[in-house]
Image: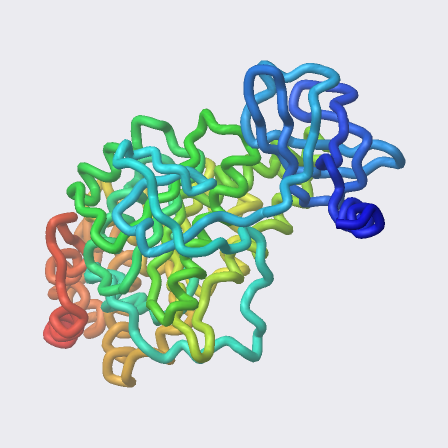
């Protein structure tokens, strides 16, 4: 080989990979220099003892800021920083089914390595508006109150809004077991570590058939919790692109927004309502709008749980923003638990924006009449209890009083009970 050809080959391929150095370390971020990255680039920080992945979150004139996916312990000034050529991609494949993984798809269930098929980007544009399919098919969940009165559609995005300890996880498990989706992707973001095995064993009965669980617990870094949600959505998109109907559940949007609050405040963003910076609000549609039905492909039907502070959905900025983005909201009411109604779905405050498109006119009329009778009961509850109402004054209220027990039984359901969509519809018809 001639000297000229050797020189040409050396010009084409650098002898060493370019790297920069850590210049400064603060409580949450690293300041580095010596590279020319873009915002969002993934970098690898090589220390003497270990390697840490991070993301470029801000640029300065001759420096860049890196937010690590793990914690800062063990890093020091002078450690080398390399740009990861793969970028923000995760490995995906059919072998994920039945497994519990972290946001980088590393198994946390102790069942060995996973053989992947391809890589998918974590961050991706939502489905183009004109490529979205029309939502016109019911999505049965097996829950009477939802299928009968708040019917969902394939490709719909719904929120489950509740305070702490009202029953979000139990309702999630009922939807997972009752739905007939081809694939089920569950994102547990910011949860306590204790809750993960409990959710799998108690709520799902240990059955992970056709199910993937992505976990980023409360002790993980804010960046891991943030991108855990996006990684889970990327897994759902992988199966959707294979013409599968996917059920996506995420618990919870609030802790996802809190993770971005930590990152944003550390970067110097101004705090707004409840201390959330603007980026926390902007991030919600970037995640939620990726769910839906796409022409020529499958669909992602999504349920996002929102932890409501003080049980007041109007005072919580995350709940308020989420409700405006989603195609419906299911409100869990703590007062209903006092009456022994589980799941405690407040059907008068809840709504499904696509119900009229996925059920026939008879079903819609029956559901509206059920809500009307139930609303009359609630409005006149005090009068009825003290005996101030005399039967015969209002025929419609008389009907509501006669059907009170039947309506409450329709709203009640044990977590072990599951009903088909046709069975629930017939129960509603018989009642009303």
Side (left or right) of 367 relative to 326: left
In this view, the residue in front, 124 or 378, is 124
Task: Single out the residue that lies furthest toward the right.
Answer: 61
Q: Position of residue 15 (x, y in %)?
A: 74, 37
User: How many numbered discs?
Assistant: 0
In the figure, 13 relative to 239: above or below? Answer: above
Q: Is residue 30 left or right of residue 224?
A: right
> Residue at (21%, 42%) from the top-left corner?
203
Give the x, y percent position of residue 205. Answer: 15, 43
Residue 14 versus residue 228: which sits nearer the camera?
Answer: 14
| Position of residue 134 measured from the top left corner of the image (x, y, whole percent) | 44, 80
At x 61% / y 36%, what residue is drawn?
Answer: 261
Assign the C terminus to one quadrant of the image. Answer: bottom left
Image quadrant where residue 177 sits: bottom left
Question: Quick check: can you spot residue 275?
Answer: no
- Residue 357 versus residue 191: which sits nearer the camera? 191
322 up-or-down from 17: above or below: below
Residue at 35 percent of width and 37 percent of height: 107
At x 22%, y 73%, the residue is 396
For residue 109, above or below residue 278: above
Q: Quadrant of residue 302?
A: bottom left
């Amino acid at each position: 080989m001639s000297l000229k050809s050797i020189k040409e080959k050396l010009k084409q391929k650098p002898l060493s990979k370019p790297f920069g150095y850590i210049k400064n370390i603060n409580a949450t971020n690293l300041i580095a220099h010596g590279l020319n990255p873009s915002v969002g680039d993934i970098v690898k920080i090589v220390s003497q003892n270990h390697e840490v992945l991070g993301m470029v979150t801000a640029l300065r004139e001759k420096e860049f800021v890196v937010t690590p996916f793990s914690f800062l312990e063990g890093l020091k000034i002078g450690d080398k920083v390399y740009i990861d050529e793969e970028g923000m991609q995760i490995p995906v494949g059919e072998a994920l089914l039945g497994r519990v993984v972290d946001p980088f798809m590393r198994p946390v269930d102790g069942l060995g390595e996973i053989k992947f098929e391809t890589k998918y980007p974590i961050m991706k544009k939502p489905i183009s508006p004109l490529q979205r399919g029309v939502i016109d098919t019911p999505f049965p969940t097996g829950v009477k109150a939802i299928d009968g009165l708040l019917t969902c559609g394939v490709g719909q995005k719904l929120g489950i809004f509740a305070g702490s300890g009202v029953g979000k996880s139990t309702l999630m498990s009922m939807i997972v077991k009752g739905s007939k989706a081809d694939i089920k992707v569950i994102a547990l973001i910011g949860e306590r570590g204790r809750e993960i095995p409990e959710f799998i064993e108690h709520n799902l009965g240990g059955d992970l058939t056709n199910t993937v669980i992505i976990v980023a617990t409360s002790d993980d870094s804010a960046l891991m919790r943030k991108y855990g949600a996006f990684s889970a959505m990327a897994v759902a998109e992988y199966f959707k692109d294979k013409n599968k109907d996917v059920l996506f559940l995420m618990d919870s949007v609030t802790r996802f927004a809190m993770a971005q609050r930590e990152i944003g405040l550390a970067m110097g963003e101004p705090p707004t309502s409840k201390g959330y910076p603007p980026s926390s609000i902007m991030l919600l549609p970037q995640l939620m709008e990726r769910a839906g039905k796409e022409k020529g492909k499958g669909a992602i039907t999504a349920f996002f749980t929102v932890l409501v502070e003080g049980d007041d959905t109007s005072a919580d900025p995350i709940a308020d923003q989420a409700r405006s983005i989603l195609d419906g909201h299911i409100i869990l009411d703590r007062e209903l638990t006092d009456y022994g109604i589980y799941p405690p779905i407040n059907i008068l405050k809840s709504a499904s924006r696509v119900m009229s498109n996925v059920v026939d006119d008879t079903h819609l009329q029956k559901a509206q009449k059920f809500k009307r009778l139930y609303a009359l009961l609630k409005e006149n509850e005090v009068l009825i209890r003290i005996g101030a109402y005399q039967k015969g004054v209002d025929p419609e209220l008389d009907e509501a009083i006669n059907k009170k027990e039947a309506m409450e039984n329709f709203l009640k359901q044990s977590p072990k009970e599951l009903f088909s969509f046709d069975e629930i519809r017939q129960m509603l018809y018989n009642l009303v």
